[in-house]
Image (cartoon, helix red, strand yellow):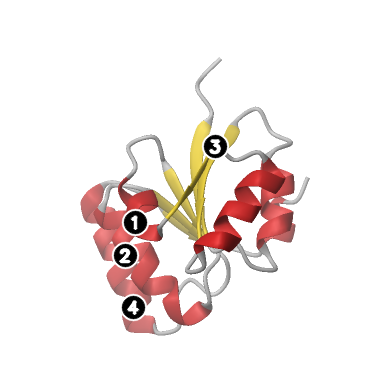
Amino acid sequence: MSSPLRIGIVGCGNISGIYFENLSKYKSTEVVACADIDIARAEAAAARYNVPLALPTVDLLKHPDIDLVLNLTIPNAHASVALAAVEAGKHVYNEKPLTISLEDGAQLVEKADSKGVRVGCAPDTFLGG
C-alpha cells in the first residue's frame, strides 16, 4: 500500500467542514495541517477534526510533510495562495474558481508545469464521499 497523500488545508471557514469530513473517510488521504488568516479558527478546526497541526499559512506552505495544498480561501486569494504553494513544490487543489482572472490562471498553470506539480479545481461535491 502506498503512503497517503498528505494534505494541508488553507482556509477554515464555512466550506472547510465538508472537506475535513470527506477527506477523513479515505485511507489514501491524510489532513496533516490547517491554516487560516484567523489562527484561532485554524486551531478550532484542528481540534474538531483531529488535525495534528494548526499553522500560519506561510508555515503550512513550506511544511515538508505536505504534498498538496487544499486552497479554501476567498476567491480573491486563490491565485496568491496557489502560486505560493506551487512555488514551494506543492500540488494545489482550489475550491472554485481556480483564480479570478485568466492571466492569473495561466500563470498558475505555467508555474505548476515548470515545477512539476499539478493544479486542479472543482467544487467539493464532485469528490464527496
Identity of the amino acid at label 1? Ala
Q: Quadrant of residue 31?
A: top right
Identity of the amino acid at label 4? Asp
Q: Which label sits in the foreground, 4 or 2?
A: 2
Report whether residue 126 is seen: no
The residue that label 4 is drawn on is: 104
Image coordinates of residue 129 in percent, x first then y, are 78, 45
For residue 83, the mark is: 2
What residue sits 40% from the left and 49% below the top?
91
Disc 3 secondary structure class: loop
Determine the CA span between mark 1 and mark 4: 14 Å
Identity of the amino acid at label 3? Pro
- Compared to 105, does 36 lie above or below? above
Determine the CA span between mark 4 and mark 2: 9 Å
Near mark 4 (Cα within 10 A), the count class, few <14, some 14-19 or many ≥20, is: some
What residue sits 51% from the left and 34% below the top?
5
| Chain-order first, disc 3 or disc 1 | 3
Instruction: Please name whichever residue, 20 or 39, is drawn nearer the observer in this view of the structure.
Output: 39
Instruction: Please name whichever residue, 66 or 60, is drawn nearer the observer in this view of the structure.
Output: 60
Disc 1 secondary structure class: helix
| Chain-order first, disc 4 or disc 2 | 2
Residues tagged 4 and 2 counted as in contact (Cβ below 8 A):
yes
- Compared to 110, does 116 lie above or below? above
| Chain-order first, disc 1 or disc 4 | 1
For residue 85, the mark is: 1
